[in-house]
Every structure is written in structure tokens, then in C-alpha cells.
Image (spheres, rainbow, N blue to C red):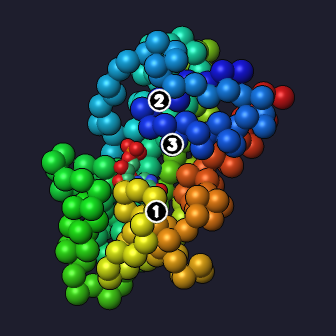
């Protein structure tokens, strides 16, 4: 079976193929499916936004489509940046400016609990919808550490491993990450659905 990934992110495409190829599933890009659309993420939850993206690409391609929506939720900021993680501080900022803004907004905060969340949704042309959620708890460091990864990785510290996401190898991160967990949960649901 072929699924179209509702994203322009090559890293996500490789990650999804790694995990889902074992089920005989091929995940292809929007470009491979001849789709070129911008979906506005107008939802207020990860569930709503991943559904919006998957549904739009399924309708445009006529094929089953899969989307993930993810972000960082910080307790002392009432869950911010949350679904606005990619746009925190406005469109003009890059990843470094965004995590610096986060550190600035948490200055003096001793309670630094946070979690990454990922919701994966798959929409089928017959109207069926499968969805799975994964979370990774951690804390926000006082300063960035590590060179790997992307986004907020340098400031997201995982106490069990005593490392930030940016200090982990891709395998270490995938084994515990929100997206890794959501993909594993999604894989189980898809396996059940295809039986
Ligand atoms: P999305 O691709 O629209 O779901 O936006 C997700 C945003 O959340 C990204 O742009 C990052 O800022 C942040 N994010 C999600 N997952 C991660 C991660 O694994 N590491 C670092 N930042 C992440």
C-alpha cells in the first residue's frame, strides 16, 4: 500500500519509511503524488492540525495520506509554544532565535517541566481515519547543549539519559521521542486495520 506524507520535510519521510516499510507500506512525498498544496494549520490542537493536513492531501491526491503535527509544551508557560511551536515569536525567527526566546520567556523559572507531543493521522479515501499520539517528557535546560537535531532539540533535556535531544544520536532520539512513540502506536493501529 502507498501512503502520501502530508509534509515537505525529507527527514520525516525517511523516518516514516524506516518504521512502516516493515508492513509493506511505501510512504511517498506530496511531489511524488503530484500534489502541491499549502494547508493552513488553523486548529488549536495537534489532533485537529494533523487531521487538517492529512485530509487535504488525501482529497488532493485521491490516495491515503498521513500527517504528523508536533510541538513542545512547557508547563510553566501553560502549554506554550504547543501547536504554535514552528511559529513561536513570529514567522521571521529561525530555530536558534526561537529557542532563545523560549529561554528568555522562562528566565527565573525553577519549574522547567515540558513535553514534546506528536499526533499522527491517516485519512483514507473511504472516509476512515486512524490517529495515534506520542509524548516525550523532559525539562527545558538553562542553556543550549549539543549540535544535532533541529528545532528546540538543544534545550530539551531528558533526565533519564542526562542529555538534550541535540546530544543524542538519531537512533537514541527515535527510541524515546514523541514522534517515535506516535509512529510505533500508529504502526500497531495500521497493522490491526489492514488485517
Ligand atoms: P510541524 O512540523 O508543523 O508539526 O511543527 C512542529 C514544530 O515543533 C517544529 O517546527 C519544531 O519547532 C517543533 N518540533 C517538533 N518536533 C521536534 C523535535 O523532535 N525536536 C525539536 N523541535 C521539534
Q: Name the residue under label 3.
A: 11
Lateral position of residue 116 relative to residue 131, left or right: left
Question: What is the distance, in whole Å, between disc 2 and disc 1 at their CAs?
Answer: 24 Å
Q: Does the residue labelled 1 lie within 8 Å of ligand 1?
A: no
Left or right for 51, reference 100: right
Image position, residue 131 (x, y; %) = 59, 39
The numbered disc on residue 6 is 2
Marks 3/1: CA–CA distance? 13 Å
Q: Closer to the N terminus: mark 3 or mark 1?
A: 3
On the rendered image, what quadrant is the C terminus found in?
Answer: top right
- Which disc, if any, is residue 135? none
Q: Earlier in the sequence, mark 3 or mark 2?
A: 2
Quarter assignment of residue 73: bottom left
Residue at the far right: name it.
195
Q: Earlier in the sequence, mark 2 or mark 1?
A: 2
Where residue 37 appears, as percent x and y from the top left, is: 35, 20
Q: In this view, does 3 lie above or below 17?
A: above
Residue plotted at (40% across, 38% down): 49
Q: Look at the image and tell me whether residue 50 can be seen.
A: no
Residue at image x 21%, y 61%? 97
Q: Which residue is drawn at 55% across and 68% down?
A: 168
Do tag 2 and tag 1 residues touch (Cβ < 8 Å)?
no
Residue density around tag 3, few if under 14, some if 14–19, many if 20 or more, within 10 Å: few
Closest to the observer: 145 or 162? 145
Give the CA separation, mark 3 to mark 2. Answer: 13 Å
From this view, report whether residue 162 is shown above or below residue 194.
below
Circle 1 residue: 148
SS class, disc 3: helix
- Marks 3 and 2: which is nearer the front? 3
At numbered mark 1, what does the secondary structure look like: helix, strand or loop?
loop
Amino acid at each position: 500500500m502507498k501512503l502520501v506524507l502530508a509534509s515537505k520535510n525529507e527527514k520525516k519521510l525517511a523516518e516514516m519509511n524506516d518504521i512502516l516499510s516493515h508492513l509493506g507500506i511505501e510512504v511517498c512525498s506530496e511531489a511524488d503524488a503530484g500534489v502541491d498544496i499549502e494547508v493552513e494549520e488553523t486548529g488549536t490542537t495537534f489532533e485537529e492540525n494533523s487531521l487538517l493536513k492529512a485530509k487535504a492531501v488525501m482529497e488532493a491526491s485521491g490516495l491515503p495520506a498521513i500527517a504528523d503535527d508536533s510541538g513542545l509544551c512547557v508547563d510553566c508557560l501553560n502549554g506554550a509554544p504547543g501547536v504554535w511551536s514552528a511559529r513561536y515569536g513570529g514567522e521571521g525567527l529561525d530555530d536558534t532565535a526561537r529557542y532563545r526566546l523560549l529561554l528568555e520567556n522562562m528566565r527565573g523559572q525553577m519549574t522547567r517541566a515540558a513535553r514534546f507531543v506528536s499526533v499522527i493521522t491517516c485519512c483514507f479515501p473511504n472516509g476512515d481515519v486512524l490517529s495515534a499520539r506520542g509524548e516525550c517528557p523532559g525539562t527545558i535546560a538553562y542553556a543550549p547543549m549539543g549540535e544535532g537535531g533541529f528545532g528546540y532539540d538543544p534545550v530539551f533535556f531528558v533526565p533519564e539519559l542526562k542529555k538534550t535531544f541535540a546530544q543524542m544520536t538519531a537512533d537514541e532520539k527515535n527510541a524515546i521521542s514523541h514522534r517515535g512513540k506516535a509512529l510505533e502506536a500508529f504502526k500497531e493501529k495500521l497493522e490491526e486495520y489492514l488485517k
